[in-house]
Amino acid sequence: MTANPAHTALWPAPHASGAVDATVHVPGSKSVTNRALVLAALASEPGWLRRPLRSRDTLLMADALRAMGIEIEEGVGPDGTGEAWRVLPTGLRGPATVDVGNAGTVMRFLPPVAALADGPVRFDGDPRSYERPLNGVIDALRHLGARIDDDGRGTLPLTVHGGGALDGGTVSVDASSSSQFVSALLLSAPRFNQGVEVRHTGSTLPSVPHIRMTVDMLRAVGAQVDSPESGGEPDVWRVTPGALLGRDLTIEPDLSNAQPFLAAALVTGGRVVVPDWPARTTQGGDRLREIFTEMGGSCELTEYGLVFTGSGSVHGIDVDLGDVGELAPGVAAVAALADSPSTLRGVAHLRLHETDRLAALTKEINELGGDVTETADGLHIRPRPLHGGVFHTYEDHRMATAGAVIGLAVEGVRIENVATTAKTMPDFPDLWTGMLGA
Ligand SMILES: O=C(O)C1=C[C@@H](OP(=O)(O)O)[C@@H](O)[C@H](O)C1
Ligand SMILES: C=C(OP(=O)(O)O)C(=O)O
């Protein structure tokens, strides 16, 4: 097989000649878009998604739902402004084939939807999707009444033999490897005959804000959900069966994808404005305001958006990123350029993401002259003068954006396969050069 030239191509990461000063319109949230698509597909009336993220992960989600019979029309919104998708829910059908790519949201959120379809739904994806854990979803669905054929490894590929309905009920899940196990079961649960009670049994639970996002979005379409935050038992969520409303939802900017742009302000001592930064949000990326302030910047949240300003100094940080693992690659990149060491904790589960992110960050930063060591649950980063070289990305969008941040401060960094950013931000190279005024 010949290598895909886009995967071996090297992108010279732009070096910043001075402080950046830019306004960056960050595209819509992957996590919100893919939840909104699933909930709209399960609703009892049509719905709208305005300013959806158009990226590999969200197009895979839309195509998968279409394969199961849902109509999704891509166009402009009812008032003629901006991109909007109209979702027309119909009976979920099999036989169907779903390509999950390497999208955690697609591989975890859709098997429960497929259990409601009328026929078999086959799931397959990129080679890495065979290595990412799915056992929590497979075992739970079987317990709740679904028939699933897999090879017994608790991963893809698999076939869900949808029976047109699912009993639902009470189930225990160890979601310490991915919060998406819990979100997946909750999202489809209003359509299970008995709803669901999900009890997390593991010792740790990553990405809790993403579970809150699931609960919040379920409630916004009329679902009744009990959660730990609403006075329920710790680590237990209950969803009552019931019809879901169609919504007209404007998708927030992806705050995790705002990270490289804010990092640019931080490492160059410049200023970046992100319009439409929500005043209230369940996106974990909102933690960037606190994390990057501790690392040397300052921010102001106005009605227009977030204004983030670097001070010219970048400090190390000791931080538990268990709630916001998505931010770890970008925090590691900034930490490698800081004036003091950093420790990133609580992110052992990053070994099971798009790639083993702890190993990848360690290797790539060290190959540029850095001093990073892996710990059991994170990274120690001791800043050292870095030099140029190839930054390999392992088909991981967040490795590519992390490499771009280092490239701002270090001349001669070349990013392998920057096109991999298409997973959640296909416009990244243009947004990046636009920010730099190139
Ligand atoms: O539910 C979601 O939308 C996500 C949950 C998190 O997954 P993990 O809990 O597997 O880290 C996060 O890292 C991922 O990017 C998106
Ligand atoms: C972990 C991530 O993605 P996924 O939804 O594929 O798990 C991520 O975007 O950082």
Image (tube, rainbow, N blue to C red):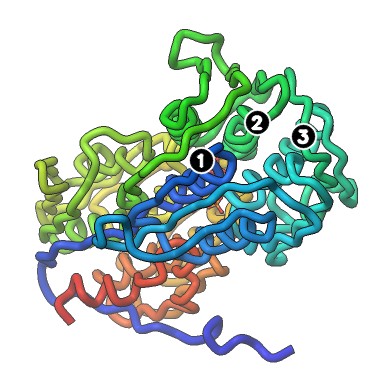
Q: Give the alpha-carbon distance from disc 1 to disc 3, as whole Å.
A: 19 Å
Q: Nearer the viewer, residue 148 or 69?
A: 69
Specify which label sits upstream in the sequence, 3 or 2.
3
Whether residue 142 is visible? yes
Q: Residue at x 52, y 15 (%)?
A: 226
Residue 278 is drawn in which quadrant?
top left
Quadrant for the N terminus in the image: bottom right
- Judge depth for marks 1 and 3 and give the one in front: 1
Q: Which mark is residue 165?
A: 3
Mark 2 or 1: the one toward you: 1
Image coordinates of residue 335 in percent, x first then y, are: 33, 52
Looking at the image, tell me whether mark 2 or mark 1 is earlier in sequence order: 1
Residue 166, relative to residue 152: is it above or below? above
The C terminus is located in which quarter? bottom left
Residue 191 marker = 2
- The answer to whether residue 21 is left or right of residue 381 is left
User: Residue at 86% across / 44% down in the picture?
Assistant: 148
Q: Which mark is residue 172?
A: none
Would residue 383 be visible to someone looking at this image? no
Disc 2 residue crowd, few under 14, some 14–19, many 20+, Cα 10 Å: many
Amino acid at circle 2: Arg
Q: On the rendered structure, is 307 left or right of 229?
A: left
Task: Say above or below: 372 vs 409.
Answer: above
Where does label 1 land, which residue? 45
Q: Position of residue 189 (x, y in %)?
A: 64, 29
**Corner quadrant of residue 135:** top right
Mark 1 Cα shell of 10 Å, populated few (<14), some (14-19), many (≥20): some
